[in-house]
Image: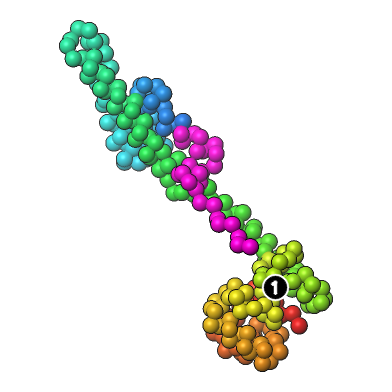
């Protein structure tokens, strides 16, 4: 059975925590929801927060448009064309400003793309996998028969025991051997051939020596291999 494909965000806000994503959408919608009257304040607040030249210029432009609206409002009904001009300026503030805000909301609320990253969880997962491998090796050393029944180191077979990603060099097929760090399909076939000739290996060092593996791979292989006899 193939493992499910990793989740990939469908929209930009997917990689942000729900609260931050909701806040970014609310911020971007304010120009439209307030008919443009909040647009200069929306961008000015973002500019002060992020100290971005783009946001500073945008805020200045929207403040200028807003100042034009305030200047023309008292003259509506007194001068021809004033109402239409105010309508255009408000359209710029409400619609253009809202579209602009939605385009840059990710840059404002997640400028480095790190809000959805949880490195501590990744580190903890790797440490747990390492601990599982150590425990599985201990079990294999003390009770090889049980280890074989649990299919430790056999990612090619269905099993329930979690060995943290071990590969049994003495029994796993070539396809599974390629899961070891640095082991190419060609090296896996070589290991399989040498294993049939010698009856198996007892350590990463012996594996590297008999199969002629690059010495640099020995330590990496040792972390993921088990040698069940």
As drawn, is 41 to the left or to the right of 183?
Answer: left
- Which colour assignment does the render follow? rainbow
Q: Residue furthest left?
A: 80
Which corner quadrant of the image does residue 130 belong to? Answer: bottom right
Q: Which residues are magenta?
A: 1-25
Determine the residue positioned at 63% across, 89% down.
Answer: 194
Residue nearest the viewer, comparing 19 with 177: 177
Which corner quadrant of the image does residue 199 belong to? Answer: bottom right
* Residue of label 1: 153
Q: Is residue 126 magenta?
A: no
Is residue 226 at all visible to an observer of this figure?
yes
Q: Is residue 8 magenta?
A: yes
Per the image, label 1 sits on a secondary structure element best described as loop
- Vertical arrangement, residue 132 with respect to residue 53, above or below: below
As drawn, is 92 to the left or to the right of 16?
Answer: left
Which corner quadrant of the image does residue 198 belong to? Answer: bottom right
């Amino acid at each position: 059975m193939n493992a499910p494909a990793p989740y990939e965000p469908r929209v930009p806000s997917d990689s942000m925590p729900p609260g931050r994503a909701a806040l970014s959408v609310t911020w971007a919608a304010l120009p439209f929801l307030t008919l443009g009257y909040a647009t200069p304040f929306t961008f000015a607040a973002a500019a002060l927060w992020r100290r971005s030249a783009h946001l500073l210029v945008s805020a200045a432009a929207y403040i200028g448009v807003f100042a034009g609206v305030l200047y023309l409002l008292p003259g509506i009904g007194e001068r021809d064309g004033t109402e239409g001009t105010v309508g255009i300026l408000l359209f710029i503030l409400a619609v253009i400003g809202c579209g602009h805000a939605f385009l840059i909301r990710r840059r404002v609320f997640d400028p480095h793309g790190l809000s959805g990253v949880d490195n501590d969880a990744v580190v903890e997962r790797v440490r747990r996998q390492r601990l599982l491998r150590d425990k599985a090796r201990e079990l294999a050393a003390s009770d090889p028969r049980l280890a074989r029944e649990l299919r430790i180191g056999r990612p090619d077979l269905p099993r329930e025991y979690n060995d943290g990603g071990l590969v049994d060099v003495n029994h796993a097929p070539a396809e599974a051997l390629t899961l070891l760090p640095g082991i190419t399909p060609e090296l896996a076939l070589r290991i399989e051939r040498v294993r049939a000739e010698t009856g198996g290996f007892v350590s990463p060092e012996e594996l590297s020596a008999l199969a002629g593996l690059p010495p640099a791979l020995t330590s990496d292989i040792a972390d993921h291999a088990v040698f069940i006899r």
